[in-house]
Image (spheres, rainbow, N blue to C red):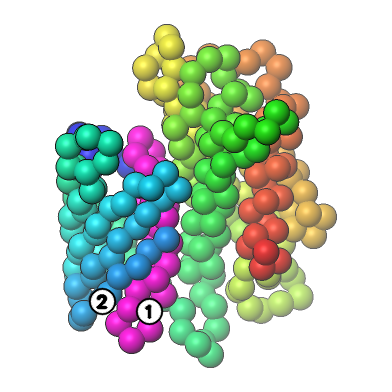
Amino acid sequence: MTGNVDGHLKVVFTEENQKLAGFMSVTGWLHGGGNITGTRHGTDFRFTTADGTGLIIEWQGALQSGKLSGEYFIKTQGGLPRQVGEWSVNTEGSLKSGVPFDANVTCSLLKLVLETRFNDPVKQADGTTISGAQNVFKSIHPAGAGISIWVESVDVDWKADTQSRRLEDIHKFRLNYILYWQGILKPTGTTKLRLAYNTKIDSVTSVEIIESTGTTNKDVNGVLFDVGAFLGRAAVNSLLRGN
């Protein structure tokens, strides 16, 4: 929490000789994830993230009863005061060399990478770049700004001819995701969407708006499907094809 504002965290660690690497996604009304560097000593974790804007955050926490929690410290930037807050994530499993992939762990990785791809910058036809959240927002709402996209849940159908549960064994997936935005008539709002993707035909098969707290464009379905196709294809190419 920073300035009485909450956000969502997703994080994946890799560890070698007590050194941590990985990636963190921060969404909701906050931002500041990115690549991770740090250390682990027993149950104590210390690491730093740096996002694409140069925002650097120092995180410290301890693992207890399946929950990793602690405090974070945002370095002073642009004359703004130092910001601090508390954070926590529930652990969802781990992978070790030579051990079969667990479906729950694979789905957690899928959610993290999809969320990362959804929030990646998008290049426009005029050469300018906007955030992934803004790219989705302008396709749905008439005025305002997209803040971030949070992947709430994912449901997976696995390929029938395999017993393993790796990313490349996914046949279809459906996900619910939420766009956080700021508007003109409404200072803040959310729009919940659903997307389905079929890896066999490499295509989004459906995109729909579930609900929104704001006004949506009159003819949104076709445009939104195009946005969903772009995001879905980028995510799948990155995940399943190792790009």
Q: Is residue 23 above or below residue 226?
A: below
Q: Bin the neighbour count of mark 2 within 10 Å (Cα to Cα): few under 14, some 14-19, many 20 and up.
A: some
Instruction: Answer whether residue 52 is visible to the viewer in this image.
Output: yes
Which residue, given by chain and number where applicable, does mark 1 sit on? 15
Task: Give x and y (percent) for residue 12.
Answer: 42, 65
Dot 1 or dot 2: first in sequence order is 1
Which residue, given by chain and number where applicable, does mark 2 sit on? 40
Dominant secondary structure of the residues highlighted in magenta in the image: strand
**Does dot 1 land on a helix, a strand or a loop?**
strand
Q: Is residue 109 left or right of residue 1?
A: right
Residue located 38% across and 83% down the image: 16
Instruction: Answer whether residue 65 is visible to the viewer in this image.
Output: no
Q: Bin the neighbour count of mark 1 within 10 Å (Cα to Cα): few under 14, some 14-19, many 20 and up.
A: few
Q: Is residue 103 left or right of residue 218?
A: left
In the displayed orientation, state which residue is furthest to the top. Answer: 185
**Does dot 2 land on a helix, a strand or a loop?**
strand
Task: Give x and y (percent) for residue 234.
Answer: 67, 51
Residue located 70% across and 58% down the image: 237
Q: Nearer the viewer, residue 12 or 31?
A: 31
Task: Give x and y (percent) for residue 152.
Answer: 47, 46
Q: Is residue 96 above or below residue 170?
A: below
Residues drawn in magenta: 8-34
46 falls in the magenta region: no
Q: Is residue 102 left or right of residue 34?
A: right
Per the rendering, the mark at residue 128 is none
Of the residues shown, which amino acid type is indicated by label 1? Glu
25 falls in the magenta region: yes
Residue located 57% across and 49% down the image: 117
Quarter of the image holding residue 64?
bottom left
Which of the image's four quarters has the C terminus?
Answer: bottom right
Of the residues shown, which amino acid type is indicated by label 2? Arg
